[in-house]
Amino acid sequence: MNWPAEALWEAVAPLLPGFTVEILPELDSSNSELMRRARAGALEPVLLVVERQTAGRGRLGRAWQSAPGDSLTFSLGLPLAPADWSGLSLAVGASVAESLHPAVRLKWPNDLWVDDRKLAGILIETASFGDGGPRRQAVIGIGINIAPRPGDGLSTAPACVRDLLPDADAAWVLQRIVPALVRDVLGFEQAGFAPFHARFDARDALRDRPVTLSDGTQGTAHGVGEDGSLLVHTAAGLHAVGSSEVSVRPAPR
């Protein structure tokens, strides 16, 4: 595949001095690799694209399968020092969704959906370094289905970019989303989640829908709070759900 490495470098390097682009044919996980590098002291901003991941990871340790051409898997690593990290995955999701297609919705806290089918997932990890100051290395991993894939064994049926854009390929999607993603992540560092709140709300796939939390609690989703927590009306009242607490499943429409 003809990856747009030079074009991406030209678009991003002015925003991230020292930025590099790497394309690898196979690796266990782009996130795992950048976390290993961060812990070893390699903290330069980098975009790592892996054509085939043998041990790709999603949130809560779930596997993410990827095959060359059928999916796009990459990680963006860069040092960040936001005043508050809350809502970063929602900001990333809003940025990617807006770059892809108007039909893409956001399923809190880190999935992109099309018609209640999973198009993409986001996994954000951080590594502390230096003297324990506010800056940490953020590793933002994104996996996107490009071509149709089997849904066997998946809790949510898969969607793909070609459902919406039949001629799209992984290289084109990468070029389409990465420059805006870098700008938005740097914007989050400066201003936090507030500028992204309305952007998330505009694509919220769960709003006003019945949801069941992983502890069995049932309620109705009512958007997100100022810190990106999911607001759920339950029998006990309004509950703010943190992404580290639960997994949320919407009831069928």
Image (cartoon, grey):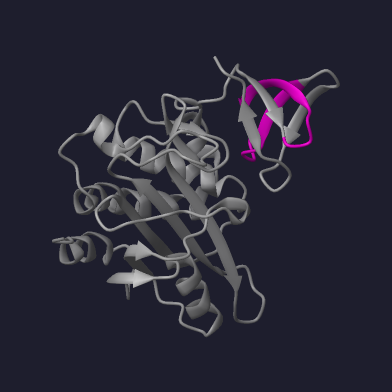
Relative to 166, residue 81 above or below: below
Q: How many marks?
A: 0
Q: Where residue 36 sits: x, y (%)? A: 51, 78
Q: Where residue 252 sits: x, y (%)? A: 57, 18
Q: Residue at x 17, y 60 (%)?
A: 4
Residue placed furthest toward the front: 152
Closer to us: 232 or 59: 59
Q: Name the quadrant containing residue 105.
A: top left
Q: Where residue 31 sits: x, y (%)? A: 47, 65
Quadrant for the C terminus in the image: top right
Residue 224 shows in this picture: no
In the image: residue 184, left or right of residue 32: left
Closer to us: 26 or 233: 26
The magenta segment is: 214-233
Q: Residue at x 35, y 42 (%)?
A: 149
Residue placed furthest toward the right: 236
In the image: residue 169, left or right of residue 156: left
Relative to 88, residue 238 above or below: above
Q: Residue at x 51, y 40 (%)?
A: 154
Residue 187 included in the magenta stretch of the image: no
Residue 202 shows in this picture: yes
Quadrant for the N terminus in the image: bottom left
Relative to 134, residue 65 above or below: above
Q: Where residue 66 sits: x, y (%)? A: 37, 56
In the image: residue 36, left or right of residue 176: right
Closer to us: 87 or 143: 143
Q: Name the quadrant containing residue 11.
A: bottom left
Relative to 190, residue 15 above or below: below
Q: Residue at x 57, y 53 (%)?
A: 62
